[in-house]
Amino acid sequence: MRYYRHHYPDSRIIVSVWDTTDPALVAAMEPYADRILLQPDPKVAGHRNINRQIANAYGALHEAERMGAKTALLVRTDFLIFRPRLIEQLTRLAKQGRKTEDRGGPLVVPDAFTRKWIPLHPSDMIMFGRTEDLLEFWGAAWQFDSTPDQQHDAPPEIYLTRAFLERRGRTKARHNQLEWFSALADLFIVKDFDWFEAIWFKKPEFRGAHEETLWGACISEADWETIGLSQDQTHTEYFSNRGFTAIFDQILNLPKF
């Protein structure tokens, strides 16, 4: 909080935490925040705590909109982003996004956990865009059914993206890999985790999505740029096979050439 306030004195800082948060911690944050929202914990958490994620994110974004913010940067509280002049650069990036028939602008996300082989899985760890677009992404309905079905059993990223695509009229992207790649190119901008110069306090050793392999592999910034240029190709031609061959080399104990 102190870091963000020092480096972004003109930005409005909103912190969304549970109403059970230690009052001493809330008091310590108050000098550095424009708003501290004490959110009631949802009685129904939803699959993988999706209702809690929506409540915190949407609550903060709604407050940002109420305060007149046209754009917003949504960041987990266990992240610290060191990139200088971050807001200025993100704003420029978003303005350079593709012009499509969809309303709204692109959402900037990191490659970390923007899955390569799992459709509809953009990262929700860091997001920047127009406030109204972020509200649209995080505006999915809460889950109240205690028996998960195929839709409710999805990871939060997929659950949110599925609803977002439906609102944007990109329903084909919910069921087709190529259509999803097209939507990813149009509605998002993927930047490498290293670009943000961020530290994740939960996993301070984490240095980027390049460490993820096979089904955990992520779409890098270069992959995202290739997708935008090559939407007529099959998905297997989008990406380098180096990640797969490296794994097979380890399994077979093959020498490196």
Image: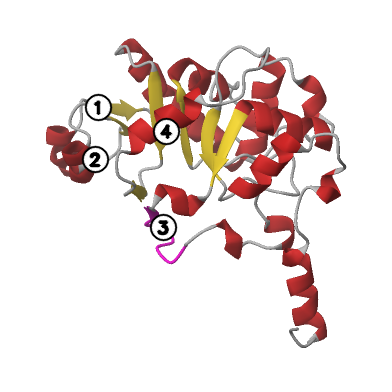
Quadrant holding the C terminus: bottom right
The image quarter containing residue 252 is bottom right
Nearest-to-viewer mark from 3 and 2:
2
Earlier residue among tags 3 and 2: 2
In primary-sequence order, the first of circles 2 and 1 is 2
Whether 115 is drawn above or below 86: the answer is below
- What residue would you read off at disc 3? 202
Q: Mark 1 or mark 3, which has the lower sequence index?
A: 1
Region in magenta: 198-206
Q: Earlier in the sequence, mark 4 or mark 3?
A: 4
Horizontally, residue 226 falls left or right of residue 70, namely: right
Mark 4 surroundings: few (<14), some (14-19) or many (≥20) residues within 10 A: many
Instruction: Give SS at disc 1.
Output: loop
Amino acid, disc 1: Ser
Mark 2 lies on residue:
4
Amino acid beneath label 2: Tyr
Q: Amino acid at mark 3?
A: Lys
CA gap, disc 4 to disc 2?
15 Å
Query: Which comes before the other along the chain, label 1 or label 4?
Result: 1
4 or 2: tag closer to the N-terminus = 2
Q: CA distance from mark 1 to mark 3?
A: 26 Å
Q: Can you tell which mark lies on residue 11?
A: 1
Distance between mark 1 and mark 4 Cα atoms: 14 Å
What is the distance, in whole Å, between disc 2 and disc 1 at their CAs? Answer: 9 Å
Q: Does residue 114 belong to the magenta stretch? A: no
Are the residues flagged by discs 2 and 1 in contact, CB closer than 8 Å? yes
Of the pair 59 and 121, the residue shown nearer to us = 121
